[in-house]
Image: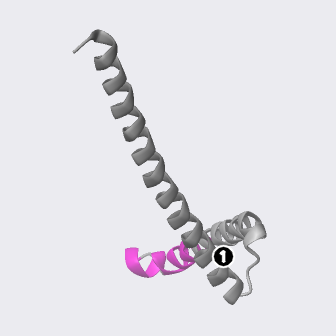
Amino acid sequence: MSNLDQQLEDVIRRRKKVTETLERLKGRKEQAQANLEAVEEECRGKNIDPAKIDAIINQLETKYGELVQELTEDIEKAERKIEPFVTGTNQ
């Protein structure tokens, strides 16, 4: 077998591998698109516009931070109020 024949076989084998990889990637892309559509539909079902999901996440994170801060302040206030009873200095 000549060198050119070997090169041709190698190139054909590589082309076949590229074609197979491309088909697998197309399948993955189709699956990802189907998953995205399902998630978007679920969002719409909950009255959330998928196009505004980042803004909604930011709002939720802000609200979460505010609530944690509020809870922390309330707990600190409660701890200060009960401290005299715990330490026995409530006279």
Residue 65 lies left or right of residue 11; in this view the side is right
State the image quarter where residue 81 is shown: bottom right
Q: Magenta stretch mostly in which secondary structure?
A: helix
Residue at x-position 37% and y-position 31%: 12
Q: Is residue 82 magenta?
A: yes
Q: Does the magenta portion include 76? A: yes
Q: Residue at x 38, y 26 (%)?
A: 11
**Image height of 18 relative to 44, above or below:** above
Q: Which residue is mark 1?
A: 40
Image coordinates of residue 90 in percent, x first then y, are 48, 80
Q: Amino acid at mark 1?
A: Glu
Using the image as rendered, state which of residue 65 and residue 28 is in the foreground.
Answer: 28
Q: Is residue 35 visible?
A: yes
Residue that lies at the very extreme toward the front in this rendered image: 1
Q: Quadrant of the N terminus?
A: top left
The span shown in magenta is 72-88
> Is 79 rendered above or below residue 2?
below
Relative to 31, 21 lies left or right: left
Categorize mark 1 by other alpha carbons within 10 Å: few (<14), some (14-19), many (20+).
Answer: some
